[in-house]
Image (cartoon, grey):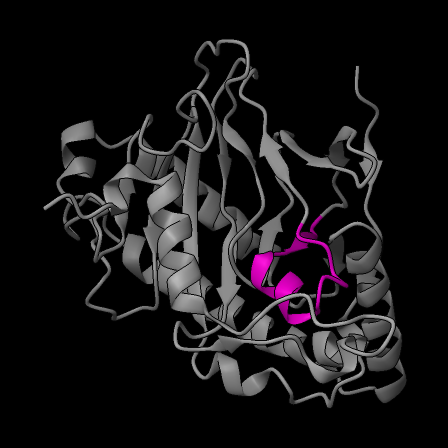
Amino acid sequence: MLTGLSLPVVDVSGHRSDDRGSTTAAAEAIGAALTDLGFVSIVGHGIPWDQVEEIYGWARRYHALPIEVKTAHGMGPANMGYIPIGGAQQGEHPALNAAFFMGRPGSARNRLPDPEVLPGFEAALTAYYRAMDELGHHLLPLYALAVGMPAEYFDQFFDPALATLRLTHYPPVLAVDGQWGIDPHSDAGFMTMLPTNPVAGLEIQEPSGTWRPVEQEPESFVVNAGDMLRRWTNDRFLSTRHRARSDVPFDRYAIPFFFDPRVDSVIDPVPSCVDADHPKRHEPLVYRDYLQAFMRRGYAATRDNS
């Protein structure tokens, strides 16, 4: 049995209140956690927890819809939407989850169920999306300060952010050896925020290579760095591999929020992370190019087979 891993806990309430000392302390703590592990637990985030629980409820109701209703607004190469079980795969076997993806409210890329099928769904997800987008922008200065850059350094790349809300369903189905709810992977972007889950299942791979389940802080967000943040920091921050178990005997849901830069952002290691002892490890990269390759590799529905 794997032993649980407690993540570093950072309270960002003082930073949200513009307390300079709290901002400095939070930035240092986040920087240390992302350098050592790539994951951190955020409290004092300002998101009402009943709003989080409401979205968990909408995830249950959405995934309970008939399959023909969900596939009518399926995900494709140019749009968000639904991906059924078997539609995501990065390892030998398909991942045992179904998911609904929603981008910026009002975007033409979003494909949602008809309002009469699920009344209130779009309004609830829109309100939550905007709250999480605001939280992501509140956290950006901490990331900049953590690497010794001015607090506003990352703002230009997130105006607006490329943020995505995902409602994931892990049904109680049998898995074969080497099959997971979500395959071991690192995230593509900048920052992922995952609220405390009433059903455990997240595991992360420590730098030593050991996989360990995450012990969750109540009413917190598990926050991890993605591949673009790793490149931006010249590999100072870790983009840690993680996975979701699929062996629980009942339905499990997750609602990660991916907070990423604009697709036209050029990701080049920040000056403070490059010096004689830490030479530049990555050439400039346009985020769009990396993201498109990441999605095509992991999601069959995003491949243009025409």
Query: Total number of numbered labels?
Result: 0
- Magenta range is 219-239
Q: Position of residue 209 (x, y in %)?
A: 77, 32
| Magenta highlight on residue 212 | no
111, 236: nearer the viewer: 236
| Magenta highlight on residue 222 | yes
Q: Position of residue 240 (x, y in %)?
A: 68, 46
Q: Position of residue 134 (x, y in %)?
A: 54, 75
239, 71: nearer the viewer: 239
The answer to whether residue 170 is above or below residue 208 is: above
Q: Quadrant of the N terminus?
A: top right
157, 72: nearer the viewer: 157
Residue at 24 percent across and 41 percent down: it is 301
**Residue 236, quarter of the rendered image:** bottom right
Q: Position of residue 144 (x, y in %)?
A: 71, 80
Residue that protrudes farthest toward the left in the picture: 306
165 relative position to 214: left or right = left
235 relative position to 47: left or right = right
Residue at 43 percent across and 24 percent down: it is 96
Residue at 80 percent across and 65 percent down: it is 30
Residue at 29 percent across and 31 percent down: it is 84
**Residue 95, quarter of the rendered image:** top left
